[in-house]
Image (spheres, coloured by chain):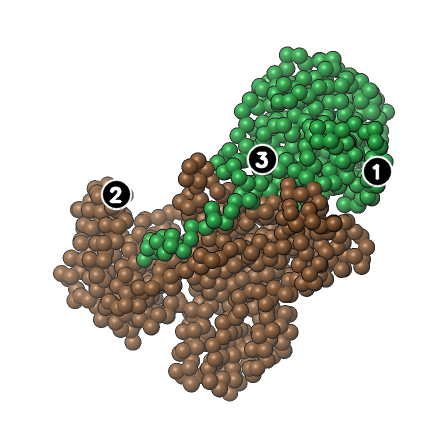
């Protein structure tokens, strides 16, 4: 992906985390996305989340597919290994990497085209395997790099920049993830840093597949009248949000904004989107109720945000495969080769 | 004329009736008699009911190629009877189940019919339809023991080993063997003129299929991650790897696994997992067949251009498309050599038999990591799934994996700066780092245009710089892949060049041609890119016959492209009907060309 190197100059007054690092140490190159792109806000939230958790950047691996969202790993954690793979196939790469070395902290960045169209199958199976990764779907309902085609998350009836109406139903990543047995499901907005940062932190703390759908308006191709994911709307919404808290260890995730409030935003064409935050009595450990809650809200034209589901138990890929503690990538050869005497012995069975 | 320890027979049964154990028993017993033997399973893409055949060739000289000349037919499948009868050579024998009358239209005057009431005897001796069907098959093994002179003590020993924990099964199997044996002895002149006599030609050999041997190669090379999607004829490779891992790769204290086998949702994901795992530092591989390679193409290009090691087994089957999944072919030579879009060229290894499958599998991991690139091991269904007699596998305990240029934390600490794609040593191979090791080692692996420092680029010169270095790197691998096998015939002006599993048929054909006064020099290529000796071989012969198993002469095309030789010097000899190559295919092909010239 294109990028511009960022000068490594730090202001001496910048706050430091437990590792003695400032937020600048968690940044990457300067973005080449469009000015005001929602994805850049998500990048900022990722920087914030890693910094707050005092994770050493080089202990992280950041992987992505293809598309605007998949460019963003270049824009954070410059001291982390990055892998910008092929379109829609990041889940396979991160699954293999995780199998080889589960000690690394994995973050996967994807988009709605990457995850819900070309890579839908890979996303589903990574969820089923419960690969330990923070999976961020930067969702703008549109193909940006190829200039404005609908994606699978575009709402029915929404208009493209050229005025064409989308005729198909949208795939809702969160509902999909819940159906497939995801152990961590959340939704947030790119502009809602107060909500997003604690969700990302919780996702990083979760041992298993942490699915975070982040609505992230495309300023160039999906920011016009008729778009249900317009930028003006999120900006409006962002003002409303109250700072949330995230307290380690995972499980004690609290949100401090007005629970149960619904905000209705009127777009230029007169259509409205209402956003509901999870309520006090919302039980994040009840998969069926979470599913129903999101569906009910959807019927009312509302998009539920927050931590939507967190499984009380999570058997990740390594538990399922019963792998040893030492990463497979670092097992000494002596522990892997049975040796010539054993080869001689086992061949008795081939006579 | 066939004689002692030099004949072939074929057993026709229905899939899923347990004939595989009877056939295995016969083959193993002959092997233990010290006689060179080879078995070819001709099976349908089906679980139960369709016709299946097993061909056994016994040859005291050690020839193991398939022969289509059958001295004896064991015709136990009414559905294929008519065809099976036609396949016996004149003067041969046919064993059939005489429980039912034989249709006179199916008799041949030049064939001796041996009727044995297998079903009748087994129905009387055993209870239940399942056991009766299974034992009917064991009974024909007993009959063959009498007719061919298989050592009954060896059969007894094999049954004892197999059913040591199931004495009831051992008794019924032995009983069934005796039924067939006794009936044949009482009713026919045993043994037949084609029969066995014990030899001492197999004591240093084993019977093994190529997929099992490849799995052992992966185990011994220290592979820890296997990702795959089930596909005929590659499935048994990963399954064998799994069973070896369960035996040798479990932590004795914790019982936890020193391996991960990931059954992916498709071949795209499978190779993606391999690339991800290798990128993170594990030795990783996938096993597949042609359709899988087709799906993997995009990822293969990523690994080539991003320079990530990967080992890919292609157990070739007859294509195109689904083709004939249970028939063999060498149809993926071009596909693998240049897999993926854009300019690519891949290291390929071509084992000729299970022993080489074992050795090349282990070597593939070294090559993949040394050259930081995908490496293909191309066997085929015949090598992968049939039992071959090969010299015992050996392992050098001094072997240590060549992990290639991977920088450690200490080495990175010493470095001023690290650039992923810089040709520091001038050999085209840059240094790489693993995630999680050191902050200085961080870089971005990408399939998009990048320069020698690992940064994204759309600059033509920077892009060409990296692309050309990768080409130099892969071309250098020509000296690292297994060298061709060469055998010369004094004064020969003609050459014969082949690949992989054609070896068995070619060496038999060369001997035969030599006896007829046609001497040919022989070369079998074992790796790609080709070394200079390949070009030299072609140039030093008037004509080189290129023997391979595909329609489009893919090996010949590779030679024209890569060894840059004159097309007129390469005469193609091909067979691609799905059966393993036979010597007669090669002999006929060579003679046809020579007759045309004369």
Q: Nearer the viewer, residue A315 or A306?
A: A315
Q: Which residue is mark 3?
A: A131
Determine whether label 2 and label 3 are within 8 Å by CB.
no
Q: Is residue B507 above or below residue A81?
A: below
**How far apart are labels 3 and 1 at the CA level?**
37 Å
At 33% from the left and 64% from the top, the residue drawn is B204
- The subunit carrying tag 1 is A
The chain identifier of the residue carrying mark 3 reads A
Above or below A159: residue A279: above
Colour brown maps to chain: B
* Sequence-first tag of 3 and 1: 1
Question: From what the image shows, is residue A113 above or below residue B459?
Answer: above
Instruction: List x then y, in percent, for residue B496.
Output: 50, 76
Q: Is residue B522 left or right of residue A173?
A: left
Q: Position of residue A73 (x, y in %)?
A: 73, 39
Residue B165 is tagged as: 2
- Viewer-proximal residue, A86 or B220? B220
Q: Is residue A87 visible?
A: no
Query: Disc 1 designates what residue?
Result: A9
Kindly check if marks 3 and 1 are in contact, taking CB atoms under 8 A apart as contact.
no
């Amino acid at each position: 992906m294109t990028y511009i190197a960022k000068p490594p100059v730090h202001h001496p007054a910048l706050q430091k985390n437990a590792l003695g690092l400032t937020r600048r140490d968690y940044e990457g190159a300067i973005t080449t996305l469009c000015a005001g792109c929602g994805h850049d806000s998500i990048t900022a939230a990722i920087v914030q989340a890693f910094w707050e958790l005092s994770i050493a950047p080089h202990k992280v691996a950041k992987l992505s597919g293809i598309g605007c969202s998949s460019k963003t790993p270049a824009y954070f954690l410059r001291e982390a290994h990055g892998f910008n793979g092929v379109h829609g196939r990041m889940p396979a790469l991160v699954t293999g990497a995780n199998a080889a070395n589960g000690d690394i902290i994995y973050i996967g960045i994807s988009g709605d085209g990457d995850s819900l169209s070309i890579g839908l199958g890979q996303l589903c199976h990574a969820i089923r395997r419960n690969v330990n990764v923070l999976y961020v779907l930067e969702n703008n309902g549109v193909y940006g790099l190829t200039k404005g085609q609908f994606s699978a998350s575009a709402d029915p009836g929404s208009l493209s920049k050229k005025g064409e109406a989308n005729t198909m139903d949208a795939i809702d990543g969160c509902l999909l993830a819940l159906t497939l047995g995801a152990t961590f499901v959340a939704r947030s907005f790119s502009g809602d840093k107060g909500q997003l940062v604690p969700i990302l932190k919780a996702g990083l703390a979760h041992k298993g597949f942490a699915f975070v759908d982040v609505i992230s308006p495309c300023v160039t191709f999906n920011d016009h009248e008729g778009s249900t994911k317009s930028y003006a709307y999120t900006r409006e919404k962002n003002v409303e949000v109250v700072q949330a808290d995230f307290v380690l260890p995972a499980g004690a995730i609290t949100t401090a904004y007005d629970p149960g409030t619904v905000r209705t935003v009127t777009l230029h064409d007169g259509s409205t989107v209402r956003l509901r935050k999870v309520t006090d009595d919302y039980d994040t450990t009840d998969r069926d109720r979470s599913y129903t809650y999101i569906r009910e809200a959807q019927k009312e034209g509302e998009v539920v945000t927050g931590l939507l589901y967190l499984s009380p138990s999570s058997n990740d890929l390594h538990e399922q495969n019963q792998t040893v503690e030492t990463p497979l990538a670092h097992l000494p050869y002596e522990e892997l080769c049975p040796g010539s005497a054993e080869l001689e012995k086992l061949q008795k069975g081939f006579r | 004329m066939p004689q002692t320890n030099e004949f072939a027979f074929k057993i026709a049964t229905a899939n899923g009736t347990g004939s595989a154990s009877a056939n295995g028993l016969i083959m193993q017993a002959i092997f233990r008699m010290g006689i060179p033997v080879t078995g070819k399973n001709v099976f349908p893409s089906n679980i139960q009911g369709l016709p299946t055949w097993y061909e056994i060739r016994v040859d005291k000289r050690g020839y193991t190629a398939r022969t289509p000349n059958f001295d004896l037919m064991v015709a136990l499948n009414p559905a294929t009877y008519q065809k099976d009868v036609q396949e016996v050579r004149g003067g041969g024998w046919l064993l059939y189940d005489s429980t039912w009358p034989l249709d006179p239209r199916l008799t041949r005057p030049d064939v001796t019919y041996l009727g044995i009431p297998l079903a009748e005897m087994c129905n009387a001796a055993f209870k239940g339809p399942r056991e009766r069907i299974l034992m009917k098959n064991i009974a024909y093994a007993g009959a063959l023991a009498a007719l061919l002179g298989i050592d009954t003590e060896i059969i007894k020993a094999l049954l004892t080993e197999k059913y040591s924990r199931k004495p009831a099964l051992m008794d019924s199997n032995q009983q069934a063997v005796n039924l067939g044996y006794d009936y044949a002895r009482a009713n026919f002149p045993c043994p037949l003129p084609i029969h066995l006599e014990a030899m001492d030609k197999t004591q240093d050999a084993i019977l093994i299929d190529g997929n099992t041997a490849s799995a052992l190669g992966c185990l011994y090379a220290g592979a820890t991650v296997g990702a795959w999607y089930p596909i005929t004829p590659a499935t048994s490779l990963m399954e064998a790897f799994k069973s070896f891992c369960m035996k040798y790769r479990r932590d004795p204290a914790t019982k936890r696994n020193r391996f991960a086998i990931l059954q992916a949702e498709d071949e795209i994901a499978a190779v993606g997992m391999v690339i991800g795992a290798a990128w993170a530092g594990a030795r990783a591989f996938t096993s597949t067949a042609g359709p899988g390679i087709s799906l993997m193409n995009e990822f293969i290009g990523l690994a080539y251009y991003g320079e990530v090691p990967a080992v890919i087994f292609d157990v070739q089957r007859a294509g195109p498309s689904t083709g004939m999944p249970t028939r063999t072919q060498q149809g993926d030579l071009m596909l693998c050599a240049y897999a993926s879009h854009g300019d690519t060229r891949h290291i390929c290894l071509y084992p000729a038999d299970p022993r080489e499958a074992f050795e090349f599998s282990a070597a593939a991991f070294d090559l993949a990591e040394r050259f930081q690139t995908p490496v293909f091991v191309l066997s085929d269904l015949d090598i992968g799934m049939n039992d071959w007699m090969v010299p015992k596998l050996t392992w050098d305990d001094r072997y240590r994996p060549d992990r290639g240029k991977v920088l450690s934390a200490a080495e990175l600490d010493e470095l001023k700066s690290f650039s992923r794609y810089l040709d520091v040593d001038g050999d085209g191979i840059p240094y790489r780092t693993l995630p999680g090791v050191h902050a200085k080692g961080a870089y971005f692996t990408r399939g998009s245009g990048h320069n020698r420092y690992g940064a994204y680029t759309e600059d033509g010169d920077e892009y060409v710089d990296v692309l050309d270095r990768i080409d130099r790197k892969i071309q250098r691998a020509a000296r690292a892949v297994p060298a061709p096998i060469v055998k010369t015939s004094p004064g020969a002006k003609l050459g014969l060049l082949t690949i992989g599993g054609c070896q068995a048929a070619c060496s038999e054909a060369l001997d035969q041609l030599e006896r007829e006064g046609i001497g040919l020099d022989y070369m079998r290529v074992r790796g790609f890119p080709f070394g200079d000796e390949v070009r030299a071989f072609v140039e030093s012969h008037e004509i080189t016959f290129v023997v391979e198993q595909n329609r489009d002469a893919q090996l010949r095309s590779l030679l024209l492209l890569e060894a840059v030789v004159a097309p007129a010097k390469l005469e193609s000899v091909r067979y691609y009907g799905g059966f393993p190559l036979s010597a007669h295919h090669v002999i006929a092909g060579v003679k046809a060309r020579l007759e045309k010239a004369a």
